[in-house]
Amino acid sequence: MFSTFYKKKLEELLYHCHRNLPSNLSDDKIISKAFKFAYEAHKNDKRASGEPFISHPYDVALILAKEIPLDSVSIAAALLHDVVEDTPYTLKDVKAEFGNEVAEIVNGVTKIEGMFENYEIKQMESYRKMLLSMTSDIRVILIKFADRLHNLRTLEFLSTTKQIRLAQETLEIFAPLAHRFGLSAVKSELEDLSFKYLDRKAYDVIAKNLKEKKREREKFIKNFIQPIKEKLTEAGFKFEIYGRAKHIYSINKKLISRNKKFDELYDLFAIRIILDTKNTNDCYSVFGICSQNYLPVPERFKDYISLPKQNNYQSIHTTLLSKDGKMVEVQIRTRDMHEIAEKGIAAHWKYKENSQHHDTNLDNWMKKIRESLESTGSEETTSQVLENFKLDLYQNEIYCFTPKGELRILPAGATAVDFAFEIHTQIGLKCIGAKVNGKIVNLETPLKSGDQIEIFTSKSQTPKLDWDKFVVTRKAKTDIRKYFNTERRKLIAEGKEQVAKKLKKHKINLSDEELSRIIHRLKYKDTGHFYYSVSQDSSKLTALIDILTDKNKLQNLEQKQLSAEELMPAGTADFSKFVKEARTSNKGISLGNGFENNINGLKYDFAKCCNPIPGDDVIGFISFEKGIRIHRKTCKNIVNLFLREPERIVQINWNETGGSDFTVGIKIIGEDKQGILTLITKTISKNFNLNIRSVDIKTKNSMFEGIFILSIQNLNQLNQIIEKINSMEGVFSVERYEK
Ligand code: MN
């Protein structure tokens, strides 16, 4: 169905695939099929250059096969990458013909096509992350690199505006990313091509100079490497050595950063020595041989072998002085290291080395990939390894735009409401609706990376209680809560005023405490809650007045005992049974052995105000959150609690003394004479074998007052200590200390 020309083209592509792809990941069938499909789909389209459109996806696939060889799936996807965007064929068609994997990749490439077109490129790092956040398969990005490279190679056919736009985008976003992926060849070409369109003059000057000096340079290189070549051969190394001009963009950077003219720059090229060896130590030996011939510049020595760069680049870099005093950069590496340097991640199929630690997400992710490659080892399982190529970095963030094209970064799951609050609190509070990419959406719809969001506000809008269920940013949550708290406070104040007015009208005189007790009896959590209800529903106030003005009703209410269920939140284990028992038996509740901090599944703890210890007379107070809190019967706080809410009080027995430590304080007053404190401390720790947790001593007029906080087992022990210390000479009084 297609001409010899395209048959030849396909053969060429397959040839490079055979050469570069791992054999088990190279499948002629899928590549041929994709090529034919793309050819059919694009057959009526032309590129800006006038060429048939198929030349673009074809070249992209070819770049991939040559520069970033991974697997035939990515080659097929590269051939199909513009089908959905530019032809009547849909993603469904691609999926039906090629399956899910290829379709997903094509979908990914389509999604990020022209992503930056409408936006001014600022915040590069964010854009790079955004790109990655939209990509869950590394092959999408790799195809995008190849796509971009081909577009730049053919950029001359586009308008100047488009040229500059694409070149800028490439220089700011794609080239640095390619660098991070370790694709140095792709990165250099992207940079040079972009530079050419962004600063044609500077580009031409450097290119011209490089060309003019080419012969001179080649002669110099030849002479320079000759002695090294001989020595290395003598030493029995298998190697390749050559000199290479640096790429134009990097030369330009040097010209700028060093503020020099072209003629003054000597390191326009680097000598590369690539060793055919698996032994990395050979690189150091070769460095040794080089420095016997030429003097090395010590401060220019860099060992990226023991300390690889973040993108896994490994090499030795050194600068040698030529006989006529020129500085020449020399790079020494093994063949495997060279592959990594040139082809980045794609080279990992063949190459394995020790993993290194890097801190950023991307580096960690690269490391993960490498580890999975290492752990599987044999080529049979490499297709499973591809699963691990899922990009999950930056997937916890989404990158969205304002209508003006400003970028905002939100956590994954964020909604239009989060976005509104991100812009401004007032926009959030007044947010009534949103358009995402031009379409009206539900406020609770999660946003996606690349979305552009327009928020609609209304003066009369107020936050809704259910917003709290779907907003995810802290800002939105806090703003909404703040709003409701302020609102609630306002309403509470309103309700309180209403209550006060009504009471006055009915000439009812009640102290705050009495009122709060009645409100509690009416089963409001607190007075605030009651006032709030009144503000919402005036019948609540009528009901209160009704009770207050009727003696019988009031008496009834006062005498009513709250049920066990009303005391505790539902679902507490066996609680009602427990409270009933506690109320009916005189003995009260027994704390079990060992004080395991719960009684029949009910939590309890000891009040800090009076620090009860086993042996003390104690009593329990039921609280909503804490379970039972145990106080000493003499505690002032419990007396107050008892008066206010007697139905919450339960009797407690210690049962048996357990082995746990309790905290107790003793206050000792005595004469401030030498050695007495040491003596007291010794008495406590030696005689009773106790831990002293803290000591606080104050002295005044030859008297001291000390608070000793002790770990103790029970009241009996405490009494013994008090007695013992009391009998010491110079001690005036010892008593249990209470805050
Ligand atoms: Mn394309």
Image (tube, rainbow, N blue to C red):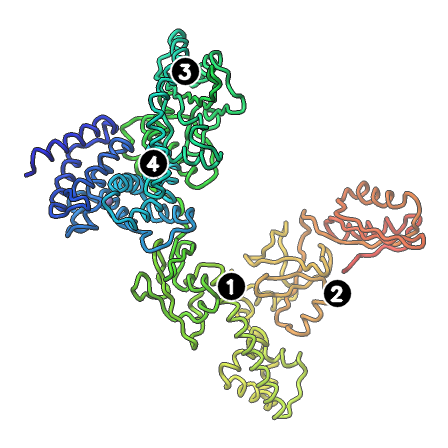
Where disc 4 sits, the SS reads: helix
In the image, is 613 to the left or to the right of 192? right
Closer to the camera in the image, 697 or 261: 261
Q: Quadrant of residue 632?
A: bottom right
Q: Residue furthest left?
A: 1
> Which residue has dot 3 on it?
224
In the image, is 664 to the left or to the right of 39? right
> Which residue has dot 2 on it?
634
Where disc 1 sits, the SS reads: helix
> Badge 3: how crowded within 10 Å, few (<14), some, or many (20+)?
some
The kind of residue on which mark 2 rests is: Thr
Ligand 1 within 8 Å of the CB at mark 2: no
Which residue is at 43% across, 54% downward?
409
Residue 638 on image: x %, y %:
70, 67
Where disc 2 sits, the SS reads: loop
The kind of residue on which mark 1 rests is: Thr
> Which residue has dot 1 on it?
478
Nearer to us of marks 3 and 1 is 3
- Of label 3 and label 1, which has the lower sequence position? 3
Nearer to us of marks 4 and 3 is 4
Which residue is at 15% across, 52% downward?
88
Closer to the camera in the image, 68 or 70: 68
